[in-house]
Amino acid sequence: MKWLFFSFFFISFAASSQWKSYRLTNSGDTINCVDKNDLKQGRWSVKVDGVRGEPGYEEEGVYKDGKKEGVWRVYTSMGDLYAVERYRWGNKDGKSDYYSISGPVREESWKAVNPANPYDTVDVVDPVDPTKVERRVVKIEGSSVKHGTWKYFDNATGLITRTENYFLDKLEDPSKIKTGINGDISLSDSTTAKERSPSKVVPKEVLEFEKKVGKKKVKVIDGSTY
């Protein structure tokens, strides 16, 4: 019994010397740690009470140097899974899924912006020749931008009811461009058909005639009266 007491005391003392504040779970795990620089670190579990009509929730995930990192899960006050979000540099990055009791509601796609370097290199597919890809360096405004395919689901059937495609926070015209989840761009079928439509062919006789007359204006008698 004394050994258990001193072991627990030693662990608590070691934790208190490393962290400015922390919390121990029922299983003895250390969570909700704040380091000497007041930065949140490691695994966190946060409960937020409802206020002004907004429902309460609980979220859990990992902090790295005061910023959310990796997968975070959000639960309703009743304990039901509400969201699975992914973070990088404290900003949403990659796919985020949202649920109701019935099933999936929405799937979002985000691109996090590195606050230390807001520039990024993106691959842009040539709208005329999909085999050509151009690399461009662009400055991204904001902390996290919509990038990729967003899907909306029917609550009753779980089927996709609508999709939206974004490229660096810009909603693409679905009749012209389709953007993949990694930002790949390709022309839609209707646009491709238009681009591939054959050009008007001028007969050889017409070309020879225009060459002789030098493309002069020719008055044509059409039967009208003056």
Image: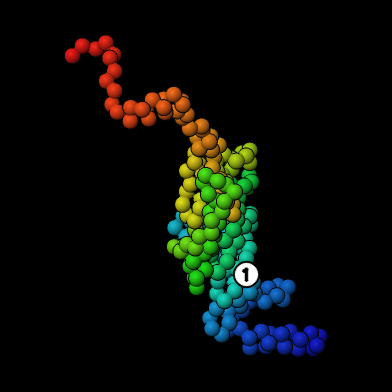
Residue at 50% from the left image edge and 35% from the top image edge: 194
Q: In front: 136, or 5?
A: 136
133 with respect to 204 (left or right): right
Outermost residue on the left side: it is 226
Outermost residue on the front side: it is 212
Q: In front: 196, or 147?
A: 196
- On the image, the x and y values in percent for residue 4 come to 79, 84
Q: In front: 132, or 108?
A: 132
Q: Quadrant of the C terminus?
A: top left
Q: Quadrant of the N terminus?
A: bottom right
Can residue 61 be seen at all in this image of the molecule? yes
Say which residue label 1 marks: 62
Secondary structure under badge 1?
Answer: strand
- On the image, the x and y values in percent for residue 77 come to 59, 58
Q: Is residue 84 above or below residue 100?
A: below
- On the image, the x and y values in percent for residue 63 come to 59, 72
Residue at 48% from the left image edge and 67% from the top image edge: 118
Applied colour scheme: rainbow
Residue at 55% from the left image edge and 46% from the top image edge: 129
Looking at the rendered structure, the number of numbered marks drawn on it comes to 1
The type of residue carrying mark 1 is: Val
Write down the quadrant of residue 207 in the picture: top left
Residue at 51% from the left image edge and 46% from the top image edge: 127
- On the image, the x and y values in percent for residue 140 come to 46, 62
Q: Is residue 26 above or below residue 175?
A: below
Write down the quadrant of residue 73 in the picture: bottom right
Q: In front: 54, or 209?
A: 209
Classify 10 Å Cα crowding around label 1: few (below 14), some (14-19), many (20 and above): many
Can residue 58 be seen at all in this image of the molecule? no
Q: Is residue 5 above or below residue 60?
A: below
91 with respect to 5 (left or right): left
